[in-house]
Image (cartoon, rainbow, N blue to C red):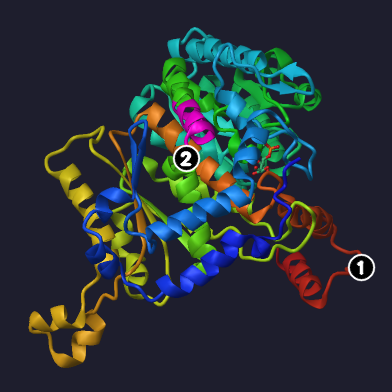
Amino acid sequence: MTTGTTALGERPAWKALAAHHQEIAGKHLRQLFADDPTRGQKFTAEFGGIFLDYSKNRITAETVKLLLQLAEESGLKARIEAMFTGEKINITENRAVLHVALRAKEGESILVDGVDQVPLVLAVLDKMAGFADRIRSGDWKGCTGKRIKNVVNIGIGGSDLGPVMAYEALKHYSQRDLTFRFVSNVDGTDFAETVVDLKADETLFLVASKTFTTLETMTNAHSAREWFLAGIGGDEAAVAKHFVAISTNAKEVSKFGIDTANMFEFWDWVGGRYSMDSAIGLSTMVAIGPENFRAMLDGFHQMDQHFRTTPFDKNLPVLIGLLTVWYTDFFNAQTVAVLPYEQYLKRFPAYLQQLTMESNGKHVTLDGKHVDADTGPIYWGEPGTNGQHSFYQLIHQGTRLIPCDFIGFYKTNNPLGRHHDMLMANVFAQAEALAFGKTAEEVKAEGVAEALIPHKVFEGNRPSNVILAEVLTPEVLGKLIALYEHAVFTQGTIWSIDSFDQWGVELGKVLATRILGELESADGKLTHDTSTNALIERYRANK
Ligand code: G6Q
């Protein structure tokens, strides 16, 4: 197992980067651009129609060289191979990490414990396609002989965020006479509002849960079952036509009452937040059709191959991942803003929050030591141009450094007058304003009163990437997601952490189970801290 065991601070490139940062920290992007007239062309990379301009970062050729050296010293090449060949790199759960197998092509072979996983993946995809076609064509009939009109995905975390994001992102390609909804929260309002205007005999529930034991999902699934039975007059036999399961746990699925013939399988080597292109994406496939879904998988696969085979200096996920390390660890940046200028990508930042923060929000290295640098930054964002009228103020003139990823497209799926040019003008304007700002002299030259000049100065020197693609298609979406998946992998490798476990979500779950019992029984001695005891007592008294 390759774990990059040399402590981060001991790696020569790390030390060199620390020294190099001293030199570069005082340099302004205005200066860096003035020094090199080719900069805007030089710091770019492109793959498969995804273009990255990273010239507006606080870097020189020397920075890139050292970051690439850091990747080498951290064993990135070997780690990539370990992932792609099914090594159990998720060491705390003793699992392979093979989301790349979900988009492998026929004829490829990826072994886990001696068993080729690719044929298993392809068989499930075929089964999903058959099912999706039947729902889309109306061939699949509900219990009263009517066709399915509404598809409700019940899941949470990785079994929800990916499906929601992909449905929103690819709505343009969806079958419009079908309604898609997503229930995740254990707050009963989520379920109640989701079904408020639906008819039970026209509704199909996809219960998406890898474990099929998740509290929120099972609670919502049971409520869905009750709602459904109440709506159709209680015929238990009808459940089979209105509930299917997506899970790795056949035993729990059949215990719930879903025929395992209507179960779509995946495997323990797919992490929840890496599962939107597995059977967890069934709602996506029903929405956009098997052909589009396969095009999305093809996009993922192309980016996988790019990540695996392209030299690091031209490798998009590697470059983006390394730049994030640069800002997080050397500039002390706390966050990264992801700003898609594409309304269909409105849930993309939320999706990325889980992908990045659940993966790299770790403080322990693979060999169990406290990591000696800051790890996963906070990801956040909103689609442009909306964000410009709210939080961009802080990015432009606040005291924090916030690296930004702008995502834009040459074309829109909804051409409408000048809208798209206006949208894209804002992408370029924002990146330009952040980098170059506006000096006191420039403000003064506009005739601004002396006292107001400091308020109107834009310091600039605020870094960003601009990512461009032709138009948002299923294939492009696949490429974009894989780009971030592998950027996360790159960062996790540098930090020598396990990007594929999520022990940090466990403690709260255990405590909630205990407290639930205490909320439901009026008495019983409470043995928490004084604050928690008092809150529970207050709730009991007022509920
Ligand atoms: C993702 C996490 C987590 C998971 C949910 C749902 O990587 O593991 O978000 O996806 O807790 O789990 P189930 O699919 O098992 O219900």
Residue plotted at (65% across, 25% down): 246
Mark 1: few/some/many CA within 10 Å (<14, 14-19, 20+): few
Disc 2 marks which residue?
483
Magenta span: 299-311
Rendered position, 360 above or below 272? below
Q: Does the magenta stretch include residue 302?
A: yes
Residue 525's disc is: 1
Quadrant for the N terminus, please: top right
Q: Distance between the residues labelled 1 and 2?
A: 52 Å
Task: Point out the residue furthest to the right here.
Answer: 525
For the residue labelled by badge 1, is the local secondary structure a helix, a strand or a loop?
loop
Give the position of the C terminus as an image quadrant. Answer: bottom right
Residue 96 in the image: state x and y as whole percent. Answer: 72, 33
First in sequence: mark 1 or mark 2? 2
Q: Which residue is drawn at 59% across and 45% down?
A: 489
Q: Answer with left or right where residue 131 lies relative to residue 31.
A: right
Rendered image: mark on residue 274: none
Q: Name which residue lies at 74% across and 71% down.
A: 535
